[in-house]
Image (cartoon, rainbow, N blue to C red):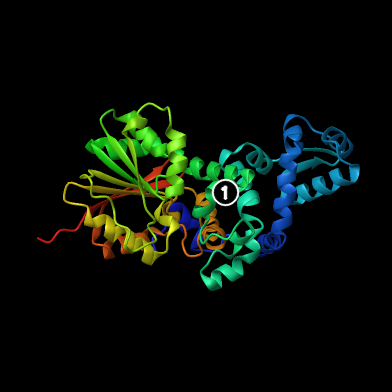
């Protein structure tokens, strides 16, 4: 199994003493409580108070507008969680390094909101989802077969957290990705699963000659058209409505596409579905077409916390999104790409928030 250097150090040997391992096990056992305590410490501004000055429990209660009992429960739990520290002499609390990251790290904030608003209730049904191969945790939002069909109908806070999560991870890599894709100056680009058109807008802004076609579900294209309206270059963004889960859904043949772009798209499908999608993509490719697949591959992460986040996010796909996809290991994705008649020519790693781009070409008979 391929693992980046940081992951090899962490995952191939024991790194904890017995005592630390026991604590880690208890941390897992109380995970839901740890999460809720920490979320409220952020939401009620307590961690922000302790960042600025050391406070007693009574002072925290008064400033947060909560009872002394509530303040003590949260502060004592946070002390053992590791987000705050206490001075034994003055009994004043302060912010720890972990608390600082919880309060200030953009990725942590996005992940916390996503887990609370999108995942929390549905994760209760993870066991059912793993056994059935269906997103059993999605049903408290609606009766759709996948979350993507219902995105436009999700409650506003849920929809806001979902898009913030999606955009945070993709947007951070766009600057690097544009350099990779436009090194070959494509005149036409097919954006598969283009969502609200953020990448398409970046493309038409980056190159005044490129024309982009976004290929997505009809309801997603409706959101896209509203999102790009009035932006410079929007007249060079077209839409092609289709449901890629349907085997009969083909790629557009109205023009030749120099580049095909799939960003954070294939992780929304099972391996068999990915193979089907890539086979259909290969049908419209020739020697001059380049397929760019951008994914957050958990095994190629530069820093271990990123791999942790990605493997946990895989279970969002299981319980909420579709029931059968995940954040893939690069070797699994490359194997499926090969089965679809394509080959990976080059991999660009460490783009933005841990993205990789797989540059693929069609295998032609010699």
Quadrant in which residue 33 is drawn = bottom right
> Could you tell me residue 53's position as x and y percent?
77, 30
- Placement of the N terminus among the 4 image quadrants: bottom left
User: Element at badge 1?
Assistant: helix
177 versus 215 height, above or below:
above
Query: Quick check: 346 left or right of 78?
Result: left
- Placement of the C terminus among the 4 image quadrants: bottom left
Q: Nearer the viewer, residue 152 or 199?
A: 152
User: Can residue 196 be seen at all in this image of the molecule?
Assistant: no
Q: Residue furthest bottom?
A: 131
User: Can residue 9 be seen at all in this image of the molecule?
Assistant: yes
Q: Nearer the viewer, residue 121 or 140?
A: 140
> Could you tell me residue 236's position as x and y percent?
31, 33
Q: Residue at x 57, y 61 (%)?
A: 143
Query: Quick check: 216 left or right of 114?
Result: left
> Could you tell me residue 207's position as x and y percent?
29, 30
* Mark 1 burial class by Cα count in 10 Å: few <14, some 14-19, many 20+: few
> Could you tell me residue 159's position as x and y percent?
58, 45
Q: Residue at x 70, y 40 (%)?
A: 96
Q: Nearer the viewer, residue 49 or 148?
A: 148
Q: Residue furthest left?
A: 366
Query: Quick check: 4 left or right of 60?
Result: left
Total marks drawn?
1
Q: Residue at x 63, y 40 (%)?
A: 101
Query: Quick check: 158 left or right of 335?
Result: right
Identify the residue under disc 1. Answer: 153
Q: Residue at x 37, y 57 (%)?
A: 244
């Amino acid at each position: 199994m391929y693992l980046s250097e940081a992951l090899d150090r962490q995952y191939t040997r024991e790194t904890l003493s017995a005592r630390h391992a026991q604590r880690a096990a208890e941390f897992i056992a109380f995970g839901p409580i740890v999460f809720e305590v920490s979320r409220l410490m952020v939401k009620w501004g307590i961690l922000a108070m302790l960042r600025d000055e050391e406070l007693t429990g009574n002072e925290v209660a008064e400033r947060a507008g909560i009872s002394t009992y509530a303040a003590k429960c949260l502060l004592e739990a946070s002390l053992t969680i590791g987000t705050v520290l206490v001075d034994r002499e003055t009994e004043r609390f302060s912010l720890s390094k972990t608390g600082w990251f919880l309060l200030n790290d953009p990725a942590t904030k996005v992940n916390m909101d996503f887990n609370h608003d999108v995942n929390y209730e549905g994760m209760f049904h993870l066991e059912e989802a793993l056994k059935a191969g269906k997103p059993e945790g999605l049903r408290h939002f609606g009766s759709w077969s996948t979350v993507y069909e219902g995105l436009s109908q999700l409650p506003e806070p849920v929809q806001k957290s979902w898009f913030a999560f999606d955009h945070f991870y993709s947007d951070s890599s766009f600057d690097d990705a544009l350099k990779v894709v436009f090194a070959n100056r494509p005149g036409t680009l097919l954006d598969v699963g283009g969502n609200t058109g953020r990448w398409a807008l970046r493309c038409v802004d980056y190159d005044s000659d490129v024309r982009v076609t976004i290929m997505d579900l009809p309801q997603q294209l409706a959101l896209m058209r509203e999102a790009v309206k009035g932006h410079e270059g929007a007249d060079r963004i077209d839409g092609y409505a289709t449901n890629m889960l349907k085997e009969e859904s083909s790629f557009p043949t109205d023009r030749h596409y120099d580049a095909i772009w799939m960003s954070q798209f294939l992780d929304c499908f099972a391996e068999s579905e990915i193979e089907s999608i890539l086979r259909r993509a290969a049908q419209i490719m020739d020697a001059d077409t380049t397929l760019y697949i951008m994914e957050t591959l958990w095994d190629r992460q530069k820093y271990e916390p990123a791999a942790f986040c990605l493997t946990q996010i895989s279970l969002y796909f299981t319980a909420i999104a579709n029931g059968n996809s995940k954040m893939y290991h690069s070797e699994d994705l490359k194997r499926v790409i090969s089965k679809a008649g394509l080959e990976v020519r080059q991999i660009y790693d460490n783009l933005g928030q841990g993205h990789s781009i797989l540059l693929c070409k069609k295998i032609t008979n010699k």
